[in-house]
Amino acid sequence: MLNELTASDDSGAPVGCGPLLPSGTANAKSMRQQIFEHVRAAGRATRTDVIRALGISAGSATALTADLINAGLLREVESIPRETGRGRPAVALEVIPDTHFAIGIKLSDEFHSAVLTDFAGNTLATASLKTPPHPKSLDEILTEVGTLMQDVLSAANKNQQNIAAVGIGMSGIVDHQAGTVPWSPLLATRNSDFASHFETRFAIPLHLDNDANMLTLAELWFGAGRAKSDFAVVTIEHGVGMGLVIDNRLYRGARGMGLELGHTKVQLDGALCRCGQRGCLEAYLADYALAREAATALHHQPSERQSPNALLDALFSQAKAGNEAAQTIFRRAGRYLSVGLANVVQLFDPALIIISGERMQYDYLYADEVLAEMHRLTLNDGRSACAVETHAWGDLVWARGATALALSAVTDQAVAAIS
């Protein structure tokens, strides 16, 4: 499970954040930045730890850590207790937390969530905002974002001038590099220049991405993915999303808009998806797809208005009570999930698939039959089956993943600024 909001271990030392495993390929980051990120990931590390982990000389470690200390990014702490209790305790290094602050935000249909963190990745405050569940103009969305940011800043006694960057995750097709949103179910118009309008309005750098990537970053920086160099995250909520980590790095594709698992086709001329096309995986698996069938199974009249969440809760209760029609809807969705997961395994061969999202409260979607069907649909001869874990996180964890996106960008700039 994700180590949410934990700031230190039993010894009082920070637990750190970020990938724990070194990259298996040539690292494009400077050695100075690799040192900083190693210390932040470890929470606290000696120079000897740095030398051993990164394979550099003692002289280089001394000189580069001195640069980071002089720049105000790292500091020496009194000691790390020795197990034997003999000899002088080693001096350790740790990140100075209040050097920079970042906000991470998850935008969704009914609630927006925000997390404020320091430079060491510690959560300082959280906030949420209920929002009308219908597509909005970009201006309306930014007004809601402004309210949410003010709430989380007030909770931490901070102001906008304290924030080095903001990360935002939202559903749909998001161009991370350009900061634009070609399509999102949250926005009434296509091809929104989201980042440019945000930065003009709030004068804070924005880093925008698909929300499934945000949850993947949360697992990579704070959760089960910290000790995995290659893994996939499949999210099931208002839509179906996917994030992929290869060699400790988030993979986005050539144009930054890949891995749209929910919009892969599982049925030609099939059910209508909210993207406007037919036969998409999420048209059989996402909450709006299940709610569409739930209304029929529960004999709801068109005049009866009920939110998708309420419909799904009622459907799940009926399934548990033995309603065959309700059970059939969940079983069918589970079979489509098996197909989607099997395709992920065949395409990417990850060491681990993490299934996450609010819909994972419905155990039909991760029943033994679903995973067994996934394994039957993959070529497993001569190799062990892909491991699958289920994490039913709330929106704050997605928002915390968005802080990782912002902190990563701030780190690049802060370390590059050292002369």
Image (cartoon, rainbow, N blue to C red):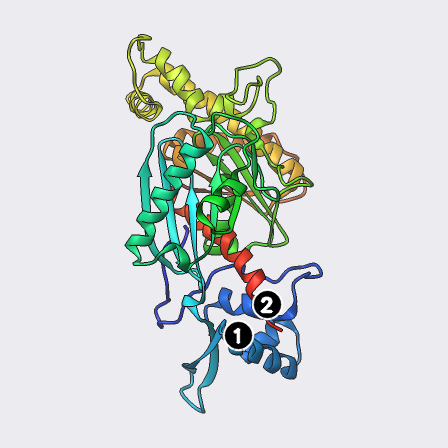
Amino acid type, label 2:
Ala
**Circle 1 sits on which residue?**
71
Q: Residue at x 59, y 82 (%)?
A: 62
369 in relation to 103, above or below: above
Question: Quick one: label 1 or label 2, which is nearer the N terminus?
Answer: 1
Q: In the image, 125: left or right of 44?
A: left
Q: Residues within 10 Å of mark 2 (few under 14, many from 20)?
A: few
Q: In the image, 79: left or right of 184?
A: left
One can see residue 367 in this view: no
Q: Residue at x 29, y 15 (%)?
A: 305
Q: Position of residue 304 (x, y in %)?
A: 28, 12
Q: Do tag 1 and tag 2 residues touch (Cβ < 8 Å)?
A: yes
- Compare residues 399 and 418 and report the one nearer the observer: 418
Q: In the image, 72: left or right of 109?
A: right
One can see residue 294 in this view: yes
Res. 407 mark: none
Q: Position of residue 158 (x, y in %)?
A: 34, 58
Res. 417 mark: 2
Q: Position of residue 312 (x, y in %)?
A: 34, 24
Per the image, label 2 sits on a secondary structure element best described as loop
Q: Residue at x 65, y 36 (%)?
A: 346
Quadrant in the picture for the C terminus: bottom right
Q: Residue placed farthest to the right in the image?
A: 26
- Compare residues 345 and 201 and report the one nearer the observer: 201
Amino acid type, label 1:
Ala
Q: Position of residue 136 (x, y in %)?
A: 42, 28
Give the alpha-carbon distance from disc 1 to disc 2, as whole Å.
Answer: 9 Å
329 in relation to 173, above or below: above
Q: How many numbered marks have been drawn onto this rendered protein structure?
A: 2
